[in-house]
Image: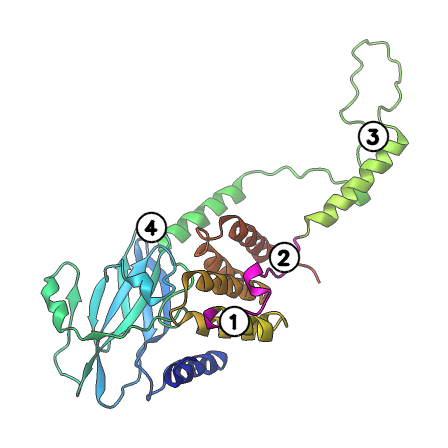
């Protein structure tokens, strides 16, 4: 059994996520919320967030901001990352200088101290003396994707301008409209007939009526198959039978009560809550995959792709299939 305090904390996270309110109240830990990252200039990305509410006996003394080229999924992901900067209390945004061709993910964690709020602001930059960091405060080791870490990658405006320019250039190129044949019709001859012998003899068609009918049927079937279809839900073998206990059982219970019943919105909330705590590596990977599937079936295809990309090394062939389907559906929604 998990400690009652942790269970209560996770319940608050789930409820607040459903009703789209800040995850942490005044009585909870001071975690920033509403994180957002977007390109603001040719080589700049601005990260913004909502300040946590103050709590009696403890105050936010600053913030640490992190950056990575892959989604920052949990606190363990930060162990190999150096913070971009330590910012003073009250800061609500940070502008990062980036490589225009790279996609970035960000996380903002609170630094706290006991007592009353100090008047002198704290500022630390990686180019300055790192000794200042020792007085910054205690790092609050809570990281929740979508709350204080971004789940969608951000690029600079330069990259977006480059894409737009390429699209405009392509649009200016002259296009030749191909002749269309309705209802599966095809041209009578594969190529125009050339009278090489010069005898002026009218030759018979090289395609029989039966062949034309077969080809027409194939074309109609091909048109139907072009329409993208959703994948069926995928369940790992480990989760088909109820395990004796531990993390595997908690995941099994989530799947049984939400995912299997196609309650994908509830499944996403429960899985996010499940992944917010330290779990075994194997169980966390499967839970994250189900989270990606939940967003896929909720038609949040951009979020699903982001989740699946984070699992590409663990399930390379499986994630590749779901990523391709997510991108196809995102660009060409299914006709109901």
The image position of residue 32, as x and y in percent, is: 32, 76
| Dot placed on the residue nearer the N-terminal end, 1 or 4 | 4
Mark nearest the camera among 2 and 4 is 2
The image position of residue 208, as x and y in percent, is: 88, 28
Question: Horizontal placement of 335 versus 143: left or right?
Answer: right
The image position of residue 73, as x and y in percent, is: 38, 64
Q: In the image, is residue 237 part of the stretch drawn in magenta?
A: yes
Q: Which mark is residue 188?
A: 3
| Dot placed on the residue nearer the N-terminal end, 2 or 1 | 2
Residue that carries the numbered disc 4 in the rendered image: 100
* Chain part drawn in magenta: 228-247
Q: Mark 3 near mark 2, Cβ–Cβ under 8 Å?
A: no
Residue 236 in view in this figure: no
Find numbered disc 2 in the image and state the secondary structure of the residue it sits on. loop
Query: In front here: 147 or 77?
Result: 77
What residue do we see at 49% from left, 46% from top?
168
The total of numbered circles placed on residues is 4
Q: CA distance from mark 4 to mark 3?
A: 52 Å
Residue 295 in view in this figure: yes
Give the image quarter of residue 51.
bottom left
Callout 1 crowding tier (Cα within 10 Å): few <14, some 14–19, many ≥20:
few
Mark nearest the camera among 2 and 1 is 1
Quarter of the image that includes the C terminus: bottom right
Q: Which mark is residue 231?
A: 2
Predominant secondary structure in magenta?
A: loop
Mark nearest the camera among 3 and 2 is 2
Q: CA distance from mark 1 to mark 4?
A: 50 Å
Find numbered disc 4 in the image and state the secondary structure of the residue it sits on. loop
Residue that carries the numbered disc 1 in the rendered image: 244
| Dot placed on the residue nearer the N-terminal end, 2 or 4 | 4
| Dot placed on the residue nearer the N-terminal end, 3 or 1 | 3
């Amino acid at each position: 059994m998990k400690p009652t305090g942790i269970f209560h904390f996770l319940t608050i996270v789930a409820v607040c996520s459903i009703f789209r309110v800040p995850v942490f109240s005044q009585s909870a830990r001071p975690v920033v919320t509403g994180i957002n990252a977007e390109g603001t200039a040719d080589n700049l990305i601005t990260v913004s967030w909502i300040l946590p509410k103050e709590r009696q006996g403890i105050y936010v003394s600053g913030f640490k901001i992190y950056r990575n080229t892959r989604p920052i999924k949990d606190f363990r992901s930060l162990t190999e990352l150096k913070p971009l900067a330590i910012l003073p209390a009250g800061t609500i945004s940070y502008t990062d200088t980036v490589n225009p061709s790279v996609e970035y993910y960000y996380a903002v964690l609170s630094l706290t101290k006991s007592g009353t709020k100090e008047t002198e602001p704290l500022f630390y930059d990686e180019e300055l003396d790192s000794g200042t960091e020792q007085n910054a405060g205690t790092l609050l080791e809570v990281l929740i994707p979508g709350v204080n870490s971004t789940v969608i990658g951000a690029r600079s405006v330069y990259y977006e301008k480059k894409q737009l320019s390429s699209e405009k250039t392509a649009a200016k190129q002259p296009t030749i409209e191909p002749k269309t044949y309705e209802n599966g019709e095809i041209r009578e001859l594969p190529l125009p007939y050339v009278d090489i012998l010069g005898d002026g003899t009218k030759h018979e068609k090289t395609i029989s009526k039966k062949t034309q009918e077969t080809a027409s049927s194939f074309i109609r079937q091909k048109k139907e198959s072009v329409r993208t279809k959703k994948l069926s839900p995928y369940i790992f073998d480990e989760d088909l039978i109820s395990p004796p206990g531990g993390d595997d059982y908690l995941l099994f219970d989530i799947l049984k009560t939400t995912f299997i019943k196609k309650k994908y919105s509830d499944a996403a909330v429960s899985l996010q809550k499940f992944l917010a705590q330290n779990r075994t590596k194997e169980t966390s990977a499967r839970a994250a995959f189900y989270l990606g599937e939940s967003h896929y079936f909720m038609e949040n295809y951009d979020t699903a792709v982001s989740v699946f990309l984070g699992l590409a090394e663990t399930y390379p062939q499986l994630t590749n299939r779901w990523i391709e389907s997510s991108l196809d559906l995102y660009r060409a929604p299914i006709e109901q």
